[in-house]
Image (cartoon, rainbow, N blue to C red):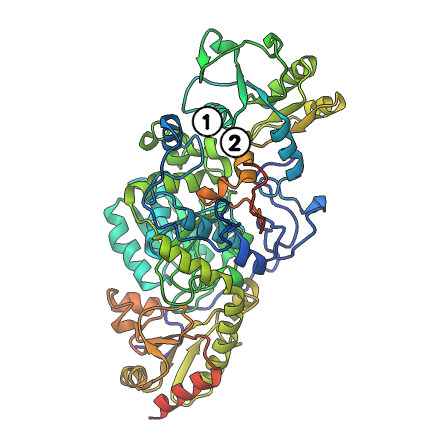
Amino acid sequence: MSDTPQPGIGEQPPLDSSETPEPARRSRYGIETRSIHAGSPPEPVTGARNVPIFQTTAYVFEDADHAASLFDLQTFGYIYSRITNPTVAALEARVASLEGGRGAVAVASGHAAQLVAFYTLLEPGDHFVGSRFLYGGSLTQLSHTFPRLGWQGTLVDPRDEAEVRAAITPRTRLLFTESLSNPAAVVADLAMLARVAREHHIPLVVDNTMASPILCRPFEWGADIVIHSMTKFLGGHGTSMGGVVVESGRFDWSADDRYPGLSRPDPAYHGLTFHETFGDFGFTMKARAVALRDLGPALSPTNAFHILTGIETLPLRMERHVRNAEAVARYLAAHPAVAWVSYPGLEDHESHARAARYLPDGAGSVFTFGLTGGYEAGVRLVEGVELWSHLANVGDTRSLIIHPASTTHRQLTDEQRTAAGAGNDVIRISVGLETAADLIADLDQALTG
Amino acid sequence: MTSPIRMLEADPGLACDPADPSCAVPGVAGEYADDLLVGIYRSARTVAMVGASPNPMRPSYFVMKYLQRKGYRVIPVNPVAVGQAILGEPVVADLRDITEPVDVVDVFRRPDAVPGIVDAAIAIGAKVVWMQLGIRNDIAAVTAEAAGLTVVQDRCMKIEYGRLSGELAWSGINGDRITSKRQALLG
């Protein structure tokens, strides 16, 4: 295993400074206000100010005609919590607002979000282009499970325009990347990807989990769909699984015949044409009424409540996550037992310039580093820390540490692990909200001991 | 001109005065003030729907059914479907064939058909011409406004009602309506 911080990543061309962020959907309100209020007016019947947990499977119809209208999507309302639930809907509207999107569908996990997004866009035999730096669990889903559904993918470097262009085929139906990769902290060139996607008239789908909408809003750079594992920073407290798919409302699904599930009468919904009927939230309606209905990964209302509560403090938490991560990264970079630190906030990181552009308020708080002592030193470190939790999650208030090669990236080949920046000597950390000096002191005793 | 998915040249992170017209976002906050739309919905009783389809999977049928459930009388206008009834209402061939007062003329026709519809709307004394999502005709809009009618273009009567009543958010749609008041603008 190499001791270079970014295995598999070569010299990158300079950024094209002529590209500036495209304005996203504009809100009348600031992002802090929306983190607290979007999607959650007082409950009209009781006046409950906080979003109640609507822990119910189903909803009484007013009469037979109302029931028929609901099933036909002719009126707005609730039928069954596998498809819609008021607590979940509040969360969907809130995340859509934070991302500057038109609509959102919340699901049971980040993996379910990817499945629902792909299922809504791809037909069997279709092709996608994905980043090879995606989170290991995503790579496994894309490389092994999605092909069994008839979707073949090509993995590319999301900073290399020539490689991205070369991977696109006439059957390619989407481009998929993380804005900030987990765990290698590669910052994708979102403006370049959006430009290439636009030229080929395919949507750019961005997993914005590691950045959160506080640090990066991919729609501003031309993305068309954003997904999150809400289990991470959005929920933020390590209590609840959840995922979400957000639609920008800008992609014209009917411009050609590539997205027949949206542009043509849908036999899965007795001939409804989703894009024509629902306009700029046609994708969201289709994802809910067909993908969520038939695949079934509904989000629990209780989880939605916990995630909603977490989002209220998201802007504050991200600010502190970033501050603590920078302090820990600088400490590690100066430590003699540390071979390299891959945090884009550090000036010598290959993604530093892109981070300054796409993540101007900080490059998140999940990153990797390698120890001069290699694998053995890594094991001693994860076992030697007292305050840091050795577990497989990120984006928690608590600081987390893991050895990806033996855990999150275990299902990958050595080659894939190395390409994903998760080689055998790599430690991944998620810097939490504890006192930075305490986090550093704990690492220090474990590195020294 | 504008479309519901038009983007504005502005910093999305900046809050701004909702009264500032440059702040309004087509399709979200709307270039039409919420109060204007609420006023239309509150004062209207009868909607003439030009281009109404008897096919239950067409958008016009969705909108007609929704408006009926909200208490509006909807009169379908479609020369091709004369002799049929849509959702219990006999179809008329032309706006001028309607004998009762019409508040809103809701247009489900191509933009080039709008000028003739506007002339008829003026002739029958309608108060509002509403062009559905994806439909605009600025010249016809000016004609209607000069005759004292209120004009809404490129909006869906169902989606806007859903946004202002909060029902749209039940489907996870971002209507950019934030309030700590107990009641929505529309019930």
Residue A7 placement (x, y as % from top left): 37, 72
Say whether disc 1 or disc 2 marks the residue closer to the N-terminus.
1
Q: Quick check: can you spot residue A159? A: no
Residue A264 placement (x, y as % from top left): 40, 30
Question: Which residue in the rendered view is the most extreme toward the bottom?
Answer: A449
Give whichever of A203, A51 is nearer the camera: A51
Q: Residues within 10 Å of mark 2 (few under 14, many from 20)?
A: many
Q: Residue at x 34, y 39 (%)?
A: A290
Residue B103 placement (x, y as % from top left): 63, 21
Marks 1 and 2 sit apart, C-alpha to C-alpha, by 8 Å
Label 1 marks a residue whose chain is B
Q: Identity of the amino acid at label 1?
A: Phe
B2 vs A245: above or below: above
Question: Which residue in the rendered view is the most extreme toward the right?
Answer: B146
Q: Are marks 1 and 2 in contact (CB under 8 Å)?
A: yes
Quadrant occupied by the C terminus of chain A: bottom left
Q: Along the horizontal axis of the image, is B136 left or right of A266? A: right
Quadrant occupied by the N terminus of chain A: bottom left
A405 vs A328: above or below: above
Give whichever of B151, A208 is nearer the camera: B151
A415 vs A286: above or below: below
Task: Give the labeled residue for mark 2.
Answer: B158
| Disc 1 and disc 2 on one polypeptide chain | yes
Label 2 marks a residue whose chain is B
Q: Quadrant of residue A19?
A: bottom right
Q: Identity of the amino acid at label 2?
A: Lys
For label 2, the SS is helix
Q: Quick check: can you spot residue A286? A: yes
Task: Give the labeled residue for mark 1.
Answer: B62
Residue A71 placement (x, y as % from top left): 36, 32
Give whichever of A15, A241 is nearer the camera: A241
